[in-house]
Image: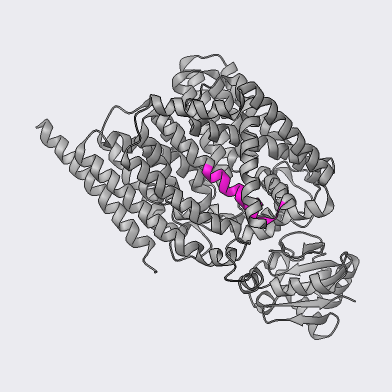
Amino acid sequence: MERIMALVLISLEAVLCYFVGGSALRRLGLELRSLPERAAIYVAVGLGILAYSILGIGLLGGLNWIGFGLLILGFVLWAGFEMRTRGSGRQVKEEAKGEEREGEKASRFEMTVIGMVGAILLVLVGGSLAPAGAIEWDSLAYHLAVPKIYLADGRIHYIPFVSHSNFPFTMEMLYTLGLFLNGPALAKLNHLLTLVLTLLLLWGMGRRLWGRTAGVVGVATFASAPLVMWEATSAYIDLGYSLYYLLAAVAFAVWWVEGKKGWLILSGIACGLCLGTKMTGAITFGSLTALLAYRMIRERRPWRDLAGFMLPAILVASPWFVKSQIWTGNPTYPFFYGLFGGRNWDEAMAQIYRASQVKFGVGKGAWDLLRLPFDLAFRYDAFTDVGTSHGVDSPGVLWFCLLPPLLLVRGHDRVVKVLMTLALLGTLGWFFSMQYGRYFLPILAILSLATGYAAQRAEQDGALRMASRAVVMIVLAAGIAFSVPFTLVRWMVVLGGISERNYLQEKLPLYRAFEYVNDTSRPTAKVAIFGDPRGFYLDRPYFWGEPNHNMLIDREKGSTAPGMVSELRRLGVSYVVIRDGWLASESREMEEVKVPEFRAALWEAVQSGLLRRVFDDGNAMVVRVR
Amino acid sequence: MKRIWTLIRIGVAVAWMLATALLYVRDVFKDW
């Protein structure tokens, strides 16, 4: 029932955001021509407004029924007013019908592609509705865990133990609402929704710019990527980031060619939301600004065009960076520590974090750059830490099949040239910063749109048309074949074949230990966890104890058994949950912040009885602090 | 001459599309 409710609520959320976003954008005069374009752009902006409203009420301490009630009421009234002005949803339907009449009839190829992508999305819903399990490390560590802490405290506040809580949190605001109204299912469906919106944007804009084949092949390129499928079933944020990145890029490209200022402002807004979703949105901001400045200089255009883009982008992005500056002293906390410094952080931790971010990839030389497309298509395991088989980290292949043949022809569309320039700049930014597979998703979204263009051009020749249609079908069929086993166990959980509890006990090493603490301790008991940051299922106030995450436990004192116990007492800790594998490890990694010393101190404290072991299931132990 | 050049380009494009797609399918499912 809760899961059905989640599906109903996400649909209502999308409808409300459609009207709110549409109302907010009306003055830009965008002249959107089809329902997919309108749905993608309006809902994307509406979700942004919703997320920032949640940030507002959260900072005011209103994460409760009154705050959320007023927020929802405000949205319903705003959407209702907009519906009345637009002549209700009937007009939307009629507009859509009119557009269908105007355009040519959908071909069998188009219908088949839409059907196959629809099948993939339907299969992915199972992954979204299932509880967050082992493959959702970051969801359980912070994307869902931090919103849960905000809700427990009724407000958004500084959380000293998790540096990630200072990241731009636009998507996490939607997860906060999802957790409040329903649970993890609704939170996760928000991420799936951003995939649907990205696909609608690819469809609508591809069709608008180049033709019907371009629309559906753009959709097929993005949706058939296993990495996209994996992300869509999680409460990560990369698909929201991709949506806003793509919107910023495509709006910018349309402005470049058509010259209507509304598109440039929309690009600025989307770029701000992109920066408000992930700090690497700075790459988007940087590449768009660079291209814009180039045009200003070359064509001697008025500089107010630059302001038309930069002002909305900076305004929309700024709340997150201002918040971080006020709470930590560093607007980009915990990044650029050398430049800005920051509370509860030091150079040793910054170095460890940096090393963990740049360990992926294939090197940064000229040869590495040259063969990057091939590596992304066929050596995708190099760009991840999951160590997966089963191809889950693959960004798909249709872009690699259809884009290079474009080099054999001349006379390309101007919009696609702008898009490819942006994709190239984005790729360079990605290549020289963090070569992490899922951070490439927004560039994949831009490439998907360009792939649609390539397919549209292939329609001009019989053999090319047949080949391009055949590869789209083959890759989509492979996508469906991938999605079913990928979500099968989670579908069994959703349909009741496997109990949620058994699933989580099996997937998460700390789950039983958390159950023990949740069942036996008083609600205010404070817990420290070591060896695994995935604290989402712990229903008590907790913090990460390891010294590579924060400086809550004094490094010197925590390096001896008596010192560790006295530090835990000072912090008011009643229970400690420790992952057995972490405690037994003999690794000397992160020696500079005394992780091995902490491990030895905890082990000695447990062995000597300073800390009393009250639970151990072979995966994790719970010890009492007296 | 122009016609031959066009045919070569189309041939290369078709071969590229099919080869990369099939290589990919084999690659993604190699561990299954």
Identify the residue at horizontal 75%, vertical 71% (top origin).
A514
| Left or right of A394, for residue A320 | right
Colour scheme shown: one colour
Q: Residue furthest left?
A: B1
Q: Is residue A99 above or below residue A116?
A: above
Quadrant, the N terminus of chain A: bottom right
Magenta segment's dominant SS is: helix
Query: Is-magenta flag for residue A186?
Result: yes
Q: Is residue A271 visible to us here?
A: no
Residue A609 location, x and y as percent? 84, 84
In-image side of A483 versus A434 (left or right)? left
Number of numbered callouts drawn: 0
Q: Nearer the viewer, residue A442 or A233?
A: A233
A222 left or right of A574?
Answer: left
Q: Position of residue A255 (x, y in %)?
A: 49, 23
Residues in magenta, as a range:
A182-196
Q: Residue furthest front?
A: A90
Tell me, yes or no, whether the highlighted magenta stretch contains residue A162. no
Residue at 57%, 34% in the rendered image: A285
Quick check: B6 above or below A334? above
- The answer to which of B15 and A610 lies nearer the viewer is B15
- In the rendered view, would you say A601 is above or below A374? below
**Residue A523 in the image, given as x and y percentages of width and height:** 86, 65
Residue A520 shows up from this direction:
yes
Residue found 51% across the figure and 59% down from its top: A384
Q: Quadrant of the C terminus of chain A?
A: bottom right
* Front in this rendered view, residue A602 or A381: A381
Q: Position of residue A105 (x, y in %)?
A: 34, 32
